[in-house]
Amino acid sequence: MNIRELARRSGVSTATVSRALNDRAEVSEETRARIRRLAVELGYAPNEPARTLVRRRSDTIGLVWDSGQEAAGLHNPFLLGLLSAVRTALSEADYHLMLLTTAGEDEPDAAYVQAVRRHNLEGVIALTTPPDDRCLRALAASTVPCAGIDTAFTGPRTVRVSSDNAAGAEAAVQHLYDLGHRRIATVTGPLHLPPAAERLAGYRRACVRLGLAVPDSYVVGGDFFLASGEAAGRRLLALDEPPTAIFAAGDQMAIGAMHAAADAGLSVPRDLAVVGFDDVDAAGLVRPALTTVAQDQRALGAAAVAALRDMLDAGPSSPVPAAEPRIVPTRLVVRGSSGPRR
Amino acid sequence: MNIRELARRSGVSTATVSRALNDRAEVSEETRARIRRLAVELGYAPNEPARTLVRRRSDTIGLVWDSGQEAAGLHNPFLLGLLSAVRTALSEADYHLMLLTTAGEDEPDAAYVQAVRRHNLEGVIALTTPPDDRCLRALAASTVPCAGIDTAFTGPRTVRVSSDNAAGAEAAVQHLYDLGHRRIATVTGPLHLPPAAERLAGYRRACVRLGLAVPDSYVVGGDFFLASGEAAGRRLLALDEPPTAIFAAGDQMAIGAMHAAADAGLSVPRDLAVVGFDDVDAAGLVRPALTTVAQDQRALGAAAVAALRDMLDAGPSSPVPAAEPRIVPTRLVVRGSSGPRR
DNA sequence: CTGTTAGCGCCTTCAG
DNA sequence: CTGAAGGCGCTAACAG
């Protein structure tokens, strides 16, 4: 079943069939309807590679995500939600989605760029990719439109999408302040990652605004994983003037801090309030359930798609439409781990 | 940069370039090397849609996963690992990957089948899809080669890949038995889902083999979510002769059971041992950490790809290569939630 | 409003 | 071992 066969059976030329099926104006309503009906009846589906070849566009965008450390769990819990969100938004916009991969270390830097050219991809969405991916840097540096969620890249046709990490952190601190806490410490992520740095900035901003002292000892570095949160918690609770509340830049670290409190014979939230960031599955499963700053994966995915479409609609020769990152609001989810200062 | 340009610069015909780049035998080593070098130098990449059009194959396979309930969390934690595993295995086999979507309720049943035809996809891998997806049933019923991980479909060219759920459950019960437990209850998933049914079967088989009594009250139905596990735990602990150990068919339910124990003033594992299934992130984060049966996502992904390749290599007219499902072993991860009978 | 024609970039016969 | 020619299925000019 191809367009020629369909044309033969409809008694028209292939050009007319093409026009009818592509909603071109210059076809009579009657023939269009007839052709459409027949197409459905015969189960005709246009051959996309052929269309791509002649139209020089594929209606397809590429998707990249962190291939290496994903097992480690850094942004892991999001990825799936983001993936789904992106997929949904893209298919609503009638784009197809292709997964891109790099084969590994001996891959040429141009791997992604070449993949884009090979498949005629119109743009790429990158999800929580590491800042040191050579192939991705090369892609961002090219003229391929790229939208990145929680990525650090920049380039001529690149838009960054991200949660409002600073505001989220600020809201967390404000929440603790409202509960009466005045000695609020924080556990950070690796500060070379933008989200980690931004969350720390939000924490500091809130403390300044609220007039809270932030001794150096109240800012402890972590790596987003459980053990680092537990270690940080131990350290903080051993201080001469321990905090009454901890804001951790990630849920795993927050849970680690809760473990540290339990080990110190303290009760959460009575003796120590804890707030995390991300709202991963586990946040709702631990006891007490973790108060946390939730990211809106749906909105992040939709924003990335929207950013990409803006660039595509603007055309290849247009100036960079929006160098400024697109920021998506977060939402504080109050659960059992944060309570009034005792 | 297309093949014609590359041919011009190499001083040969396009035919020769094509042969050189596609590793055909009838090209002299010398010209091949020269062309290859030039191709890299000029950053030439063949146009895949054009290749697909003429070769009538795309080297691309489609990927489908549960679009609806994924937010619910049923198999959620796996999906990402499976996705990565499949992606890796497929790219190692030089296949490209396309994500497939159904637009929703008003989609024709043939949606996936048509997508496969449109893009010339050579096969489809389905991940943890619901048994009632009309589009997927239509796909499985077609001649498109399909490999499914934790899927319920069957069709002429279909292979099912799955963890050895029964053996995993059996190992969990054996582990509890070895710790001295003799009153072992279970919390099941929805039994219309194959993994849930198989885990229950494994539990029963182990109990029979070990000579353990299984009163009806020791088998409590759940839905894989936290609350159902907690409710089941409450029910079990309220029995006249409560179990000393619980095997839950999912980690969330296992954690729920731990909560129920805590609420009843019991200590895990001292008063009650708990074993889960899946080894989700949260299993390592709760306290005590959850003993659980881990699925091997990498192996599942690789098995699905291998199954698909077997069908593809066998050719379209060959008989169904393997109607029997491919089973991947599980691994018991012993953590703190299971201890000797007190 | 519709048909005819000419490719899109590539691979694959068939000749040399 | 290499080149010339034809066509994969479709769309986009250009005529009518």
Image (cartoon, coloured by chain):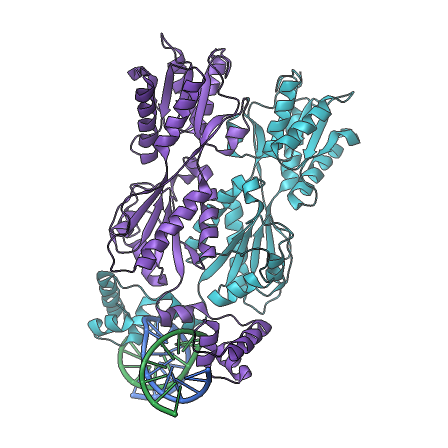
Chain colours: A cyan, B purple, C green, D blue
Relative side of B340 to A328, left or right: left
Residue B177: % across, % down: 41, 18
Q: Nearer the viewer, residue B98 or A153?
A: B98
Residue B179: % across, % down: 45, 17
Location of residue A141 by image quarter? bottom right
Q: Nearer the viewer, residue A277 or B316?
A: B316
Location of residue B75 by image quarter? top left
Location of residue B226 by image quarter? top left
Q: Is residue A312 above or below residue B72?
A: below
Residue A330: % across, % down: 58, 39
Q: Is residue A172 above or below residue B131?
A: above
Relative side of A150 to B199, left or right: right
Relative side of A69 to B306, left or right: right
Residue at the location (27% across, 74% down)?
A4
- Is residue B157 visible in this depiction of the protein? yes
The count of marks equals 0
Q: Is residue B338 above or below residue A2?
A: above
Residue at the location (36% across, 8% down)?
B241
Residue B289: % across, % down: 53, 25
Outermost top residue: B240
Q: Nearer the viewer, residue A202 or A61?
A: A61
- Is residue B226 visible in this depiction of the protein? no
Relative side of B204 to A124, left or right: left
Residue at the location (29% across, 75% down)?
A14
Q: Nearer the viewer, residue A288 or A318?
A: A288
